């Protein structure tokens, strides 16, 4: 049987590299594309010798040229940490807009299926809780996070336009906070930050009062959800995340317990436009994909801590 070929943009990133691995296991040929701005060769080095894996260094904001037949284009290239997109707002906007346009163009040209990795940030600082896919969001377009939120909202809009006009078979997933091995330790996001601080006996930096909430999904659960969406017939957005909600202060205390660190908690100013609460309504994914996360936070964090230690 001829193997299907998948192009994964952002394939050397945290989520992208796990996805490359999973799809090779499922019997696909994977073309991993990354410009290595936040992705790392270390994430995919173990895949480089495999016949079903090819790495292409390329910035997807430029025209994407692939000679062979392609069955799926999964567009995961993006800066995803608030620290990164605050530092590089223009690159963030370009990869979400021009990058998505090019990735859609490739899918159309190859008659391939397409998936855009969108985000819970399309809901902004949500006024509805938990957030169902039908919620349109509360985003500040000109705020500091606007570059990320609006680029992903544009990405969703152009994906639906390609679906409606060019009949490209498209999927939109809205990924909520995800964590696990291969996040960069100095990524800036809360889980690696706290683990780094705890392992180095530095104070854990809670922003604001730590009463803001997030819901943390372990990477393996997310990858399972992504794979099910990829095989589904669903063209409308699907939330993928863990619906168990924690305050950031609870997370800090849990990590202090799990790492048995001597670190204390210190409080730092809350970043501008930091969403106060976030929790996915995953009824749609449960119904449509028979999917829900199975890894609890203690276990997922423990695995992540072990990985960072190693
Ligand atoms: N946060 C924190 N301390 C840190 C890093 C982040 O208190 O060292 C908070 C941040 O203000 C936000 C939450 O943790 O409320 C999650 O932040 P993250 O950067 O992981 O991603 P976000 O969910 O905001 O996109």
Image (cartoon, rainbow, N blue to C red):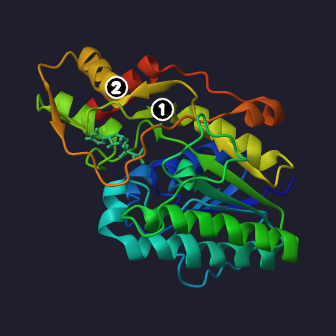
N-terminal label among 2 and 1: 1
The vertical placement of 102 against 216, above or below, is below
- Give the residue pinned by disc 1: 216
- State whether residue 57 appears in this view: no
From the viewer's side, name the closer residue of 182 and 205: 205
From the viewer's side, name the closer residue of 305 and 100: 100
Q: Position of residue 198 (x, y in %)?
A: 19, 28
The quadrant of the rendered image in which ligand 1 is seen is: top left
Distance of label 2 from label 1 (alpha carbons): 10 Å
- Please give left or right for residue 167 compared with residue 190 in the image: right
- Please give left or right for residue 183 compared with residue 308 in the image: right
- Please give left or right for residue 25 compared with residue 220 in the image: right
Q: Disc number at residue 251?
A: 2
Looking at the figure, which quarter contains the C terminus?
A: top left
Q: Position of residue 213 (x, y in %)?
A: 42, 33
- Residue depicted at x 45% and y 34%: 214
Helix, strand, or loop for circle 1?
A: loop
Helix, strand, or loop for circle 2?
A: helix
- State whether residue 147 appears in this view: yes
The vertical placement of 73 against 227, above or below, is below
* Label 2 crowd (10 A; few <14 / some 14-19 / many >=20): many
- Residue depicted at x 79% and y 76%: 108
Q: Position of residue 105 (x, y in %)?
A: 72, 79
- Residue depicted at x 87% and y 52%: 1
> Mark 2 touching mark 1, by CB under 8 A?
yes
Q: Position of residue 293 (x, y in %)?
A: 62, 27
The vertical placement of 145 against 266, above or below, is below
* Label 1 crowd (10 A; few <14 / some 14-19 / many >=20): many
- Residue depicted at x 82% and y 68%: 163
Q: Is mark 2 within 8 Å of ligand 1?
A: yes
Q: Examine the image and state in which quarter residue 272 appears.
A: bottom left
């Amino acid at each position: 049987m001829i193997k299907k070929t998948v192009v994964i943009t952002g394939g050397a990133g945290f989520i992208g590299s796990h996805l490359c691995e999973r799809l090779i296991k499922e019997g696909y040929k994977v073309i991993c594309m990354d410009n290595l701005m936040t992705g790392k060769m270390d994430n995919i080095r173990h895949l480089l010798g495999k016949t079903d894996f090819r790495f292409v260094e390329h910035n997807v904001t430029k025209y994407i040229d692939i000679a062979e037949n392609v069955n799926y284009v999964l567009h995961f290239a993006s800066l995803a940490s608030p620290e990164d997109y605050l530092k590089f707002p223009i690159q963030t906007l370009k990869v979400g807009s021009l990058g998505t346009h090019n990735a859609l163009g490739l899918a159309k040209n190859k008659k391939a299926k397409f998936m855009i990795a969108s985000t819970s940030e399309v809901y902004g600082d949500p006024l509805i809780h938990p957030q169902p896919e039908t919620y349109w969001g509360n985003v500040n377009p000109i705020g500091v996070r606007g570059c990320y939120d609006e680029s992903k909202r544009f990405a969703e809009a152009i994906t639906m336009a390609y679906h409606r006009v060019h009949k490209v078979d498209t999927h939109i997933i809205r990924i909520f906070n995800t964590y696990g091995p291969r996040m960069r330790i100095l990524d800036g996001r809360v889980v690696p930050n706290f683990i780094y601080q705890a392992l180095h006996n530095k104070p854990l930096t809670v922003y604001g009062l730590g009463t803001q909430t997030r819901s943390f999904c372990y990477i393996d659960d997310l990858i399972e959800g992504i794979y099910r969406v990829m095989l589904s017939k669903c063209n409308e957005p699907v939330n993928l995340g863990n619906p168990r909600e924690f305050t950031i202060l609870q997370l800090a205390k849990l990590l202090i317990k799990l790492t048995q660190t001597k670190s204390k908690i210190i409080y730092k100013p809350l970043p501008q436009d930091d969403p106060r609460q976030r929790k996915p309504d995953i009824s749609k994914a449960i119904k449509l994909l028979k999917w829900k996360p199975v890894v609890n936070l203690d276990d997922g964090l423990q695995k992540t801590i072990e990985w960072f230690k190693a």
